[in-house]
Image (cartoon, rainbow, N blue to C red):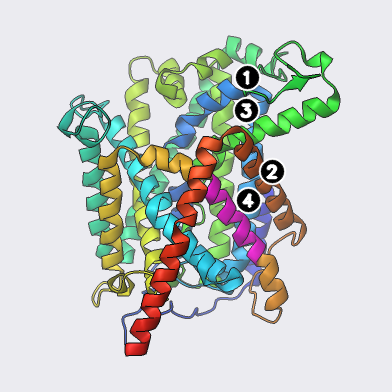
Amino acid sequence: MALCFVFAIRLGNVIPQQTSSPANVATASAPKFVQGMGLFSATAIVMGSMIGSGIFIVPADMSRVLGSPALLIAAWLVTAMMTIIGALSYGELAAMMPKAGGQYVYLRESLGPIWGFLYGWTLFLVIQTGTIAAVGVAFGKFLGVFFPSVSQTHWIWHVGSGNIGLSTANLAAIVIIVLLTWTNTRGVKLGAAIQNVFTSAKVLALLGIVAVGLVARNAAAMAANFGHNFWSLGPWKLQGMLSHHGEWVGHGEWPRASLEEIVLNVAVVLAVVQVGSLFSSDAWNNVTFTAGEIKNPKRNLPLSLALGTGVVLMLYIACNFVYLSVLPMAAIQNAPQDRVATAVMQTAFAGLGAKLMAAAILVSTFGCVNGLLLAGARVYYAMSQDGLFFKSVGKLDEKTKTPVNSLWMQCVWACLLCLSGQYGNLLDYVIFAVLVFYVLTIGGLFVLRRTRPEAPRPYKAIGYPVLPALYIVMAVWICGVLLRYKPQYTWPGLILVLLGVPVYWVWTRRSNVERAVE
């Protein structure tokens, strides 16, 4: 994280102010994006899109798998390393191609249009919209702390015995999705202003948790978590993973295992739990989608990526130390409904803790939904400009200069996912695919260095080629482990992506026919 801030200072001092080119548009007379967001707003999108409800919940599941305070911290440090390397690598691509669409554009330009389309297809189908739905429903769940009638089990309209239908929690999610979509159609400055306010509020909430940890430390928890148990290993319950001469190695049996076995098993279990920590830290790339609306994007895009990821990940690691300082490991593992942060606040403020934490998560999820809505619509706009999505989505409103049709299409699909009750499963399925697209995009950095050596690069990735290559190795390792130990989440994700291949060829043929007619 210190690397992020060294980079930020260097970039801020070295790169002069420049006027960036407008986003790609069909004709010179068409409405163009307004560059209405400065460095603070861009950084707020990075931070606001990253901070949702995950940091308050996922440490419970991670700790159940790891069983070790040291490994819990190590898992978040691995996440921090990968996310920061990814952000610093994306910074070069963002400064080189400051266009609306971000990662879609980078894949299109480095690897070819089909790769950009597959990313945009998966983003619309579930990555962005599924996350919007999931975070929106999380908002509804925590709203129920203050209004008990708001619940996922309080049905207004229900289909069968599953989760399909409209509950009061889903209705709350739909209301905020529609409301925030509407505000974002009023202009990027209003959407950015909302993002700035709520990101500032949720950062203060995380700082509040850190402050609580300083004053509410539990001597028993400190002794248990940071004493002789700190370096404990296991027991890990992943079938077929840990073996010593063909036998499962459990807690207390590690002296029987060789150093090579221990290192390999630690690497495997850390990779497995990255599902929680990596994707609690995901969506940092969303700011690249809005490049056409950021002032001086060649400077502010890479700078916002470095600052935003650095601050959020420091807060995340600090929060995990707080959890370990206030709660024994068993209490973290068995926190009611995995709400670790709520359990911490309850310890510090008996009777008020649950409501204080619920209020913080309401602020966090509201701001997260806004950032995801604002950014995602710009990708579908860029795809439409390339003839790879509905034509109407590629138009900007004459007055507000926002992709209104794209915003509303995203809104409708996200709301349908809220009703389906399947957004959580879909997100699990694409976790693997998201990592694959990160690997492909950073791989594209190497391709562009070779194929476009003379292209202007206002900022070059720090540590190239070592750090980007390290990211690829780490991400490929995690993907391989997930294929082995969580096939139920990896193969469906790949299938979702591959379904986009025939769609791409259909859309390409349709686009070629339309151009021929014109």
CB under 8 Å between callouts 3 and 1? Answer: no
Label 1: few (<14), some (14–19) or many (≥20) C-alpha neighbours in 10 Å = many
Residue 19 appears in the picture as rendered? yes
Q: Give the residue type at disc 2.
A: Trp
Check residue 84 in the rendering and tell me which mark sits there, or answer none: 4
Q: Is residue 161 above or below residue 177?
A: above
Which badge, 4 or 2, comes first in the chain's sequence? 4
Check residue 67 in the rendering and tell me which mark sits there, or answer none: 1
The residue carrying mark 3 is: 72
Q: Is residue 423 left or right of residue 496?
A: left
User: In the image, which residues are magenta?
Assistant: 432-444
Which badge, 4 or 1, comes first in the chain's sequence? 1
Residue depicted at x 43% and y 72%: 292
Answer whether residue 263 is magenta in the image.
no
**Whole-percent x and y of residue 426?**
41, 42
Q: Secondary structure at mark 3?
A: helix
Residue depicted at x 80% and y 26%: 261
Residue in front for this viewpoint, 427 or 206: 427
**Whole-percent x and y of residue 84?**
63, 50
Residue 373, quarter of picture:
bottom left
Residue depicted at x 62% and y 72%: 15
Label 4: few (<14), some (14–19) or many (≥20) C-alpha neighbours in 10 Å = many
Q: Is residue 320 above or below residue 395?
A: above
Which badge, 3 or 4, comes first in the chain's sequence? 3
Q: Give the residue type at disc 1.
A: Gly
The residue carrying mark 2 is: 477
Q: Is residue 394 above or below residue 418?
A: below
Answer whether residue 434 is magenta in the image.
yes
Q: Is residue 427 left or right of residue 149?
A: right
